[in-house]
Amino acid sequence: MDFWFWASIFLGLSLFFAVLEIFVPSGGILAFLSATMLLASIVLAFQSSPLFGGFFMLGVAVSIPVFLWFAFKIWSNTFIGHRILLQPEEDPALQPNTELIALKQLIGKQGVARSKMMLSGQIEIDGKRLNAISESESIELGDNVIITSVDGINILVRKVTASVDVPEKTATNKTEQEPTIDDPFA
């Protein structure tokens, strides 16, 4: 038997151990055997002849990445692949954040400040109370505000200088009115 025959046998064993490592986790033992067999096959190919060794190594350099891509493509559909890789519909981090989407839809809407906002406070938009942060200036209770942006869960608002028709929430009796708290820093 010639060296090229043994080089081909070792290359086949290397591919076999690589596939076995992908489908049967062994903690890297099978991967080590695969790499050792691959190195041995290249050495044997060069011992056959330098020309054959060069072509053999070029063929290995091209075929191994293609082979591994194909094996991982198949592996992701196996039982072990499903257990290790999360599917997008199973991973909560990959699901759209409906709360953030709803907040971003508020950009450009106008409302009323429901507390004095030195930096942050409450606003009311469409009958809903939301915590918000003033962009730069303090906003007084009852001032008209507009949502300028949403940064994460922070709603940034700005005082509207022109009068805007925003319906004020009116209480029918004194017990339903919300208490107002005087600002201790004013």
Image (spheres, rainbow, N blue to C red):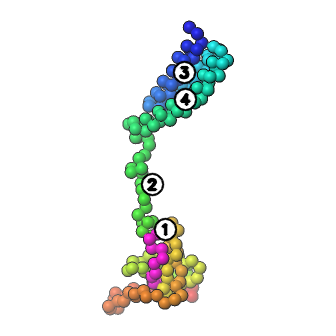
Give whichever of discs 1 and 3 has the lower sequence position: 3
Q: Which mark is residue 93?
A: 2
Q: Residue at x 53, y 17 (%)?
A: 9
Residue type marked 3: Leu
Outermost residue, top direction?
A: 1
Q: Residue at x 34, y 87 (%)?
A: 176
Residue type marked 4: Ser
Q: Determine the CA span between mark 3 and mark 2.
A: 41 Å
Q: Secondary structure at mark 3?
A: helix
Q: Which residue is mark 3?
A: 11
Question: Which range of residues does the magenta coloring cover?
Answer: 104-114
Q: Secondary structure at mark 1?
A: loop
Q: Which residue is mark 1?
A: 153
Q: Nearer the viewer, mark 4 or mark 3?
A: 4
Q: Which mark is residue 63?
A: 4
Q: Position of residue 75 (x, y in %)?
A: 43, 35
Q: Determine the CA span between mark 1 and mark 3.
A: 56 Å
